[in-house]
Amino acid sequence: MELELQKIELPGVPAERPLVIAGPCSAETEEQVMDTARQLAKHGVKIFRAGIWKPRTKPGGFEGVGVEGLAWLKKVKQETGMYTATEVANAKHVFEALKAGVDILWIGARTTANPFAMQEIADALRGVDIPVLVKNPVSPDLELWIGALERINQAGLKRLAAIHRGFSSFDKKIYRNLPQWHIPIELRRRIPDLPIFCDPSHIGGKRELVAPLCQQAMDLGFDGLIIESHCNPDKAWSDASQQVTPDVLDFILDQLVIRDTHQSTENLKDLRKQIDECDDDLIQILAKRMRVAREIGTYKKEHDMTILQTDRYSEILNKRGAQGTQCDMDADFIKKVFEAIHEESVHQQMEIINK
């Protein structure tokens, strides 16, 4: 289905990219909230975020101050004039946040992954006009992400946006959550009018990664940033390592290069023609490779051989990865390409053997 969307326009908030939402991971104390908010307001931030309820992976950790913290958000709004935003995970959260006058709601990755929870939130929001930002689910499932947005939209809410916060992985690499940029890029292709925010704090998991991730998001044409900023990050009660001070945040934002997303691409016509020609050649080469794979399948069938030859598969991956590196391509990228090619080759051979 197509989403029925309206722009998220907030009086007093500049319309140009990036729209910035900043504040601590968690509202901890009134003093911490107000100190952070005053510093952010001084630097021109217009939307203040703070977690009131904090879903944790395991019980026993700090799970947010709860309803008490909503009064602090009201005070932020009254004293600084900033809009306020917080996360909701169930109908009770929605009710309490709306009662306290919170301006923007966001839905976390764990909640997005649960259609029952999303429907409960959608039902609680029915008839309310408030901006709602939906984070991607923890797993790289685009349909689940879109489904969550659809549920909110079907409840009558039109001021929607997506938040890209990365995807969980068993492989712990440089990032806390892998960016997998191709997924939000596909979301943009599928729903062009949907604003997309980047959450560099949760993608990176380390404050030194926030700046480069912000720039990557801007280079990809993202509309906004939601960043964790704390008056004393090292003393934060949750996610201390990924929060930056308001001063550092101001420096990061000041250094961003914001490229024009509306420039004509007419001058790229010749280069794009070359890309199209390369793609045509790739298709022909892959078609030839699959014909050879089918011939191999016929040979294996005639000689009663198994399809999967593990040693040969490992040899291909290692050899092609090394070749890719020599040609200035990432070895992991080449590995993924040849994994996909091998999967299709096996499929082609299976059809031969099962005839």
Image (spheres, grey):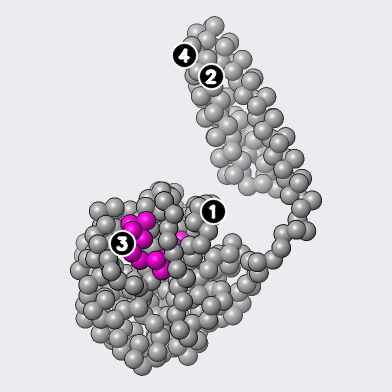
Q: Which residue is mark 3?
A: 155
Going by the numbered disc 3, the residue's amino acid type is: Ala
Where disc 1 sits, the SS reads: helix
| Residue at the spot 75% in from the left edge and 56% down from the top edge | 268
Quadrant housing residue 95 = bottom left
169 is higher (above) or lower (below) than 341? below
Could you say which is closer to the camera, residue 269 or residue 90?
A: 269
Q: Nearer the viewer, mark 2 or mark 3?
A: 3
Please indicate whether residue 198 sits to the left or right of residue 76 in the image.
right
Give the magenta range. 150-164
Picture coordinates of residue 249, whole percent (x, y) = 50, 79
Mark number, residue 189: 1
Q: Which residue is mark 2?
A: 349
Q: Is tag 4's residue or tag 2's residue first in the polypeptide sequence?
A: 2
Q: Is residue 88 found inside the magenta-colored segment of the image?
A: no
Q: Is tag 4's residue or tag 3's residue first in the polypeptide sequence?
A: 3
Q: Is residue 155 found inside the magenta-colored segment of the image?
A: yes
Going by the numbered disc 4, the residue's amino acid type is: Asn
Please indicate whether residue 207 sits to the left or right of residue 59 in the image.
right
Going by the numbered disc 1, the residue's amino acid type is: Arg
Mark number, residue 354: 4
